[in-house]
Image (cartoon, rainbow, N blue to C red):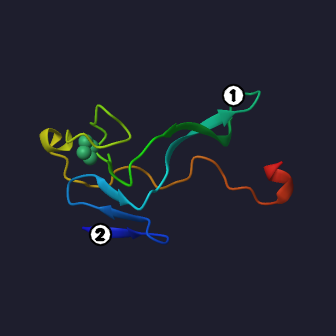
Amino acid sequence: MAALGGMGNMRIEITENGPCRVTGDVPQSDQVIATDSQSQSARWRQGQEYETSGEYGQCRCGQSGNTPFCDGAHEQARSDGTEVATQAPYLAMPTSRTDRD
Ligand code: FES
């Protein structure tokens, strides 16, 4: 199990071939890519917020029927936990205050 880190009592740990184990009342929500008038990706906007208990498993296999939470489907999917998603940002970070306004 590898620890991603934490703030205060908040902690996220990667379990072997399973979910991220999230503890310490970490909020869970979606972030949605919003588009501009030319349908180009422009910014993130707040999406659905999920009610959580103090501890939960966050799916990282993509097979859960209850995303973003783990429902145990990774065991049938035989996920090996290998990270395959790109780490490249979807949107460029703002470079000045004007870019954020
Ligand atoms: S990690 Fe458990 S269902 Fe995806």
Query: Residue 12's spot in the image, x, y percent?
Result: 38, 63
Element carrying mark 2? strand
Q: Is residue 82 above or below residue 10?
A: above
Inter-mark Cα distance, 1 to 2? 39 Å
Residue 25 horizontal side relative to residue 66, left or right = right
Q: Nearer the viewer, mark 1 or mark 2?
A: 2
Which is more N-terminal, label 2 or label 1?
Answer: 2
Query: Residue 2's spot in the image, x, y percent?
Result: 29, 69
Residue 62 horizontal side relative to residue 5, left or right = left
Q: Can you tell me which quadrant of the image ligand 1 is in? A: top left
Residue at image x 36%, y 37%?
A: 67
Element carrying mark 1? loop
Q: Quadrant location of residue 17? A: bottom left
Image disc number at residue 62: none
Q: Amino acid at mark 2?
A: Ala
Query: Residue 30's spot in the image, x, y percent?
Result: 52, 41
Q: Quadrant location of residue 39? A: top right
Q: Amino acid at mark 1?
A: Ser
- Residue placed under numbered mark 1 in the picture: 39
- Residue placed under numbered mark 2 in the picture: 2
